[in-house]
Image: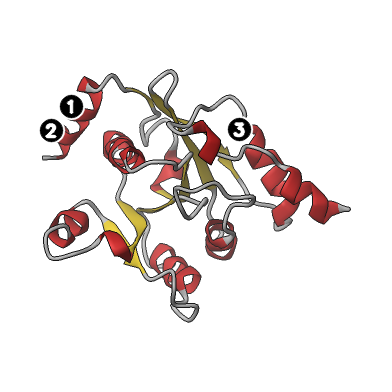
Amino acid sequence: MKAIWILLVRLRGWKFQLPTIEECPELKRCVLVMAPHTCIEDFFVGAASVWKIGLNAKIFMKDSFENWLTAPILRWAGVVSIDRGNKNNNLVGKAVEMLNQADNMTVVITPEGTRKAVKRWKRGFYEIATQAQVPIALSTLDYKNKVATIKKIFYPTGDFNADMIEIMKEYQDVHAKVPSMFNKSDAAYRDKLI
């Protein structure tokens, strides 16, 4: 079924410029950032990318997508539903625990947290990587060139704002499906350094 999913994404014109786990062993245990996230198609291309690499991935997605029809498919796809409205859900702690209990697990997160335009990425992906002491894989979905890739393996230093300035550099040449919804500016992080 996953092979069919990947084929369907390819038939839509997408190319995968992705490393194998052998070429990039850090991918076996990391937080994989999927960006930009401006449309539902991102999920289909992103999931195909994760499976193309062969990752044992848990894809974090808001629970509003889950219903009686979609729940079995989402669980099969590796989706972990999250209740973003619950401030006590301890999502970071649960993700860190998942990573700490596994030798081979990738947590996939869309750090924008929504398909709408945001000034800053949500910090959870960074906290998960820092607390679990794993790298952050910076993946991109470029709609202009229809290429899915991993730009860089980033090791967080603990300085969120300084690291975000470096992370945002990797997304400057990436084209979202809805460009007006993808904020590539690092201004919100530079303000915090002053």
Residues at marks 2 and 3, CA–CA distance in whole angstroms: 30 Å
Q: Secondary structure at mark 1?
A: helix
Return the residue at label 2: 4
Q: Is residue 152 visible?
A: no
Amino acid type at circle 1 is Leu
Amino acid type of disc 3? Answer: Glu
- Left or right of residue 144: residue 105: left
Report helix, strand or loop for mark 3.
loop
The residue lying toward the viewer, choosing from 115 and 78, is: 115
Q: Residue at x 64, y 50 (%)?
A: 119
Q: Earlier in the sequence, mark 2 or mark 3?
A: 2
Q: CA distance from mark 1 to mark 3?
A: 27 Å
Give above or below for 177 relative to 163. Answer: above
Report which residue position mark 1 lands on: 7
Residue found at the very far right of the displayed protein: 194
In the drawing, what numbered circle is on residue 170? 3
Quadrant containing the N terminus in the rendered view? top left
